[in-house]
Image (cartoon, rainbow, N blue to C red):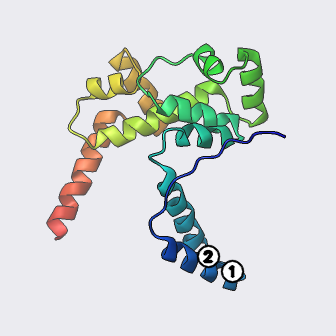
Amino acid sequence: AVSVPFIKTTFSHIALLHNVIQNLSLQKTLPQQFSEQMFFACLSIFSTHRGFMFLLFRCINSVALKVRYIICSSPSRAWRVKDISNSLYMSESLLKRKLQEEKVSFSQILLDIRMHNARQLISSKLSVNQIAIRCGYASTPYFISVFREYFGITPHQMMINQSGFIESRIAIK
C-alpha cells in the first residue's frame, strides 16, 4: 500500500459546507466567478497550515510558474539559473530545456518579475535608487536603462504620469 500524505484541518462551518455542496450538485454549469470564489475560499481554509504552500508548489506542473514563484519570494536577490535549478533539484541544462519547451527563458521571467515589481513600487514614495535596489539592480543607471527599454519611458516619467493621473482624479472629485 502506498501512503499518500494529506493535509487535514477542522472546519467550523459544516452547515455552510453542506449547503454549498448541495447547491453545486444541483447546478449543471457554474458561473466562472463563482467557481473561482469557491476555489479561493477552499484554499483559504488551509492557507495557515504549515505544509500547505509546499503542497501547492508541488502541484504546479509548469516549470516556468515554479521559477516565477521562487523569484517572487525574493525579487531583490541576484538570481542565477544555478540558484533556481538547485531549488528545483534539477540541472541547469534541464531547467533551461524545460523553460524552452514552455517558450520562455530564465532571463525573461526574471525581467518580467523585476519590471512588474518596479511598476508597483513606482506609485510608492521610494526613490528610483531604492526601487532599483528592491528590484535586484545594483546599478541605478542600468535599472533606468532596462526600465526604459521595457516600458518605453523612464521610471521618473512614469512617476510623473502616475502622480498627474492621481492629481487629475482628485480634481474631478
In percent of width and height, residue 59 lies at 67, 43
Q: Name the spot of residue 4 as percent of width and height, x first.
A: 73, 42
Q: Is residue 152 visible?
A: no
Amino acid type, callout 2: Ile
- Tell me the residue at 22%/52% (across/down): 164
> How dense is the environment of label 1, judged by Cα within 10 Å: few (below 14), some, or many (20 and up)?
few
Counting from the top left corner in percent of width and height, residue 87 is at: 61, 21
Label 1 sits on a secondary structure element that is helix
Q: Position of residue 86 (x, y in %)?
A: 63, 17
Question: Could you tell me which residue is drawn at 76 percent across and 29 percent down?
Answer: 98
Which of the 4 image quadrants contains residue 88? Answer: top right
Tell me: 137 left or right of 157: right
Residue at label 2?
21
Residue type for callout 1: Ser
Res. 129 mark = none
Residue 69 appears in the figure? yes
Look at the numbered discs 1 and 2 and tell me whether their residues touch, using CB distance below 8 Å: yes
- The answer to whether residue 48 is above or below residue 54 is below
Q: Residue furthest bottom?
A: 26
- Relative placement, left or right, of 113 versus 62 is left
Q: Which residue is more in the foreground, 91 or 46?
A: 46
Q: In this orientation, which residue lies closer to the viewer: 19 or 28?
A: 19
- Which picture quadrant has residue 120? top left
User: Along the horizontal axis of the image, is 156 left or right of 167?
Assistant: right
Q: Which corner quadrant holds the C terminus?
A: bottom left
How far apart are the two marked residues, 1 and 2, measured between alpha carbons? 6 Å
Q: Residue at x 81, y 39 (%)?
A: 2
Residue that badge 1 annotates: 25
Secondary structure at numbered mark 2: helix
Residue nearest the viewer, comparing 151 with 134 = 134
When asked about the image quadrant of residue 126, the answer is: top left
Q: Return the residue found at the far right.
A: 1
